[in-house]
Image (cartoon, rainbow, N blue to C red):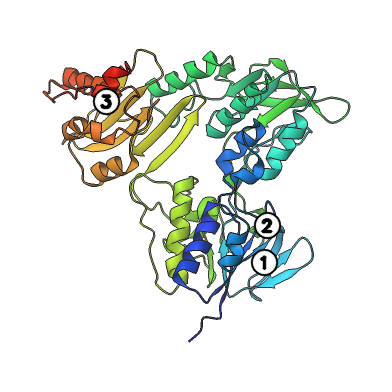
Amino acid sequence: MKDTRHVVIIGNGISGVTCARQLRKLNAAVSITLISGESKYFFSRTALMYVFMGHMKFEHTQPYEPWFWKKNRIELIQDWVRDVDFEANKVFFQSGESLTYDELVMATGSKPNKFGWPGQDLQGVQGLYSKQDLETMEEQTKTGVKRAVIVGGGLIGIEMAEMLAYKKIPVTFLVREESFWNNILPKEESELVGRHIKEHHIELKLGTELKEIISDQNGHVKAVITSDGDEILCQFVGLTAGVTPNIDFLRETELEVNRGVKVDFYFKTNIPNVYAIGDCAEFHEAPAEDRRTIEQVWYTGRMHGETLAYTLNGNPTSYQPGVWFNSAKFLDIEYQTYGTVPPQWKKEFITSFYWEHKSGKVSFRMLMNKAGEILGVNNFGFRLKHEFFDQVIREKWKGEKVISKLEEANFDPEFFSPFYIEIQKAYNSQFGTEIRVAKKSFIQKLFGASA
């Protein structure tokens, strides 16, 4: 029997698009509509900074050509959703149009946090999440910005700092914590990133919060007041103190919400045939011991969308989060994390191995339980293979075995510095092991690569 259902997905970020694509792969008959007021076509959100810096055009951030959507019979609507009538199964748009659905998926993503700071809605004050944020930032920083202030130390903040510094705009970074991102990173890694930020001539004010944003006579920012009482003259303020689920238009409805839309492990809400995935979804309980109820990471968003597609196709599938992974870039330094590496741990239960290169820009940390089994890894300044650490953490390899096989995890080409050799030496030194240290290849010797 032909599937005549109409599946409507609100949001065309990684979660919504993955859900639509996977559902189409599984089901050739069902009607699929993707809705977004932000942009007609899916784009890479992490590439917005490179558009601002002039390294690419916005259309280059779109992984799929416009014809892709028509070929796969995925209908696209560019409009903002104003309201949803869950009893009538109908979505209402700001344009005045409406659309009927059989199954509805919320994939509305996030929006920048605001904490009620005086002046937070002035001209020249903004976050960085959407295409519209990029356009506003481009306009606001064209001329007349002698200094910018960024509020909140995290991944979006560091991106914004790099963008502004690239255009020769001096930046002051206000970070509440005493060390950069130390609510996520252990002490040594946090200090490594902090040093690197300062090396890029970005003024880093640690232990400092925003108190107030001051307006000029035209409603534009002219200064900020910090928690220390200092006044910093500036013409642009970036609010990057995290993000929150973008669900304001759903709060006065019968849909159960808290910080996000409440869902079970099948992404079902309290309303039949209504689901939520990605940044806007909040599980009733964490999907794993070391996970949070809201997962706002690109790769988990993709997993949400793919998992829900099977359920929408009649094969109820529970979310299986797998090994935690994330990656980012702190200016010139790449960062990857696998498994569980909290900022602090109890030494009676967890053993840490940490190595840092003499440059102060490359490091490797591995945490192990008391049985010697790997729990997680942080690495900075070089790349390691995702599939290697996904396997070793799932299979609970001993730390010594992981280090002995580290050459297999090396992602970099032959003539990049073979840091794993120095890591193996340091592990032997700390733990008294006799791991056979790898040797440099002929090409590495030829090009003089050394750790």
**Along the line of sight, which residue is nearer the eye, 369 or 198?**
198
Q: How many marks?
A: 3
327 vs 119, nearest the viewer: 327
Q: Specify whether residue 323 is in view.
A: yes
- Could you tell me residue 227's position as x and y percent? 64, 21
**Location of residue 326 by image quarter:** top left
User: Where is residue 171 drawn, in percent x and y?
Assistant: 65, 20
Q: Earlier in the sequence, mark 1 or mark 2?
A: 1
Amino acid beneath label 1: Val
Image point (53%, 33%), residue name: 155
Whether residues under marks 3 and 1 lie with C-beta atoms below 8 angstroms apart, the answer is no
Q: At label 2, which amino acid type do we have?
A: Phe
Comes first in the chain, label 3 or label 1: 1
Q: CA distance from mark 1 to mark 2?
A: 8 Å
Q: Amino acid at mark 3?
A: Tyr
Image quarter of the C terminus:
top left
CA gap between label 3 and label 1 equals: 54 Å
Judge by depth and name the residue closer to the eye, 14 or 83: 14
Find disc 2 in the rendering and name its residue: 249
- Compute the Cα span from label 2 to label 3: 50 Å
Q: Residues within 10 Å of mark 1 (few under 14, many from 20)?
A: many
Question: Of discs 3 and 1, which sits in the foreground?
Answer: 3
| Residue 420 image label | 3
> Badge 3: how crowded within 10 Å, few (<14), some, or many (20+)?
many
Nearest to N terminus: mark 2 or mark 3: 2
Q: Which mark is residue 84?
A: 1
Labels 1 & 2 near each other (Cβ < 8 A): yes
